[in-house]
Image (cartoon, rainbow, N blue to C red):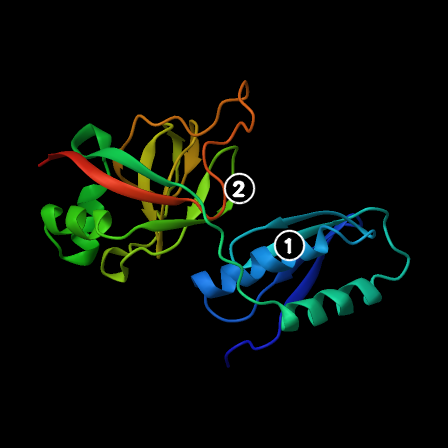
Amino acid sequence: MTQTEPQVSFLGTTALLFEAPGEMCLITQQRIWSLAREAQSWPEVGEAIPGMNNMLVSFADPPTNPTPLIMRLQDAWRAARPMPLQGRLVALDVIYGGDAGPHIGDVIAHTGLAIDDIVALHTAPDYPVYAIGSHPGYCYLGGMDRRIATPRRQVPVLRLPGGAVSIGGLQTGVSASDGPSGWNTIGSTSMVFFDATLSPPCLLQPGDVIRFRAERVIR
């Protein structure tokens, strides 16, 4: 059965998670952005942080009765209209395959596509930045072609380098720093996504758009 109403769960006593109904898509995400902007102005809310198809709401003060806030969120969601964010277009030059993309063979095996087809499908869309999270500077992207969707790895990689361009399920993304990952790395870029000395420290924000360009394909 398709979920038609938002779901709310508690994260300890200091926050809750609001999950939008339905499949992940840009229109739903734009409603999440709209809801987050409104909820951020409420006195009972400390922060309203958009995620992928969801929103984390921290309490300004832990409420003794959270039901009024939950009902207010649900009412605001029903009234929320998509809020397009006019961001920047950022082009990323990517080296696909070889040492830069050690798991592209797994994507080839799963999809049955040749490497040139995978690169062509991966570089064709413009990818809207839905949310920032996971680790500083990391962008959750929408818009990947389903033909190159590949399940996450059964055994995660313990140290994926920053700049790794990967596919996990129906999504693609770029690691902003070194760290573990269960996604399939198909390439790499030299772009720096997080610098603590800058303001803001994150290169990209929700509403920005990433365009991947094939700098080189190693077969």
**Residue 83 pos. (x, y %):** 53, 59
**Residue 217 pos. (x, y %):** 12, 36
In the rendered image, the vertical position of residue 37 relative to residue 93, given as above or below: below
Please name the residue shown 55% across and 51% down the image: 51
Quarter containing the C terminus: top left
Comparing 99 with 67, the one in front is: 67
In the rendered image, the vertical position of residue 152 relative to residue 188, given as above or below: below
The reply to whether callout 1 and callout 2 are in contact (CB within 8 Å) is no
Residue 100 seen in the figure: yes
Q: In this view, does 67 lie to the left or right of 150?
A: right
**Residue 133 pos. (x, y %):** 53, 41
Image quarter of residue 8? bottom right
Please name the residue shown 55% across and 70% down the image: 21
Q: Pick out the residue farthest to the bottom.
A: 1
Q: In this view, does 99 lie to the left or right of 11?
A: left
Please name the residue shown 49% across and 46% down the image: 206
**Residue 133 badge:** 2
In the rendered image, the vertical position of residue 187 relative to residue 54, given as above or below: above
Please name the residue shown 23% across and 49% down the image: 122
Q: Pick out the residue farthest to the front.
A: 86
Which residue is denoted by mark 1 in the rendering?
36
Q: Pick out the residue farthest to the right.
A: 64
Q: In this view, does 150 lie to the left or right of 45?
A: left
In the rendered image, the vertical position of residue 34 relative to residue 163, given as above or below: below
